[in-house]
Image (tube, helix red, strand yellow):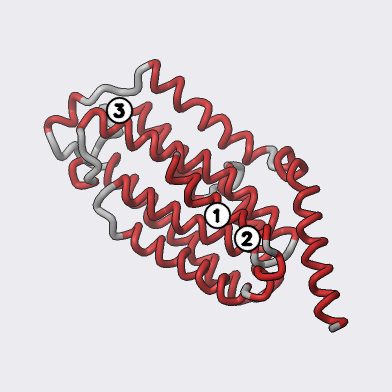
Amino acid sequence: MECQILLLLPSGCFLLFPEQARANASWIVVLALIGIVYGALVAMVQPNMKKLIAYSSISHLGFVVLGIFSFTQAGLNGAMFVMLAHGVSTGGLFMLAGMLYERRHTYEISEFGGLATPMPTYSTFFLFIVLASVGLPLLNGFIGEFLVLSGAFQHEMWWGIVGATGVIWSACYLLWMYQRVFFGQVKHAENNSLPDLDLREHVALWPAAVMALIMGIAPLWWLNAIDPAIHNVLASFSQLAAKAVTQ
């Protein structure tokens, strides 16, 4: 969770310097798109579950920056929503990975396989949070990425195209990780006796799962709350654009 805060906090600071942000937007968007694709590709080849989730966070951070520098209402709304959704879904993934580490003291994906048999409830929670992070419609990851890409397409077509590849890569590396950890036969004998979720772990996971569902079903609750701030930001950018035209 601390890692997520350190990653996402600087993104909002761009909005404190609208003139500099607008002047350097093209370069920053290129870096954001590189971050989306690079983070996804590095996540794809990670043999370690925790590192895979960490690189997934870097890729999602690129969507936040892309949305901000689209300078559109859809993009800015999407960027703010991605921050909220990312805190829920990626926080849930780190929590689930930690629960597995408590049982086996390793994050190596090759040490698992077939865990859906001894840990059916755990595997269900893991799948739900993975789908939320991937951006399945009606879950929290969808609306933010959709709005960011809408804003990117409004500004530059190629921004949206490159950004959309990040969504595809996200589905690839997360679902492939899930398949290797939970499907197939149990590869290691010690995994047969792994206990399923206990009450303490249920109490920790249910809020994240419920929040992911509510944010996906009723995104307007959050979007309406951040709308006034978004309008203020857009107004400041409009004033800068008008000032640049008159000079």
- The quadrant of the image that shows the N terminus is top left
Q: Label 1 amino acid? A: Pro
Q: Give the amino acid type for the residue marked by disc 3 in the picture.
A: Met
The one of 215 and 172 positioned closer to us in this rendering: 215
Q: In this orientation, which residue lies closer to the viewer: 33 or 9? A: 9
Residue furthest to the bottom in view is 247
| Residue tagged 2 | 14
SS class, disc 1: helix
Residue 81 against residue 68 in the figure, above or below:
above
In the rendered view, would you say 206 is above or below 4?
above
Query: Where residue 11 sits: x, y (%)?
Result: 57, 56
User: Which residue carries the number 3 mark?
Assistant: 119
Say which residue appears at 24% left-offset and 46% top-offset. 109
- Marks 2 and 1: CB-CB under 8 Å? yes
Q: Residue furthest left?
A: 189
- Label 1 CA crowd tier, 10 Å (few <14, some 14–19, many 20+): few
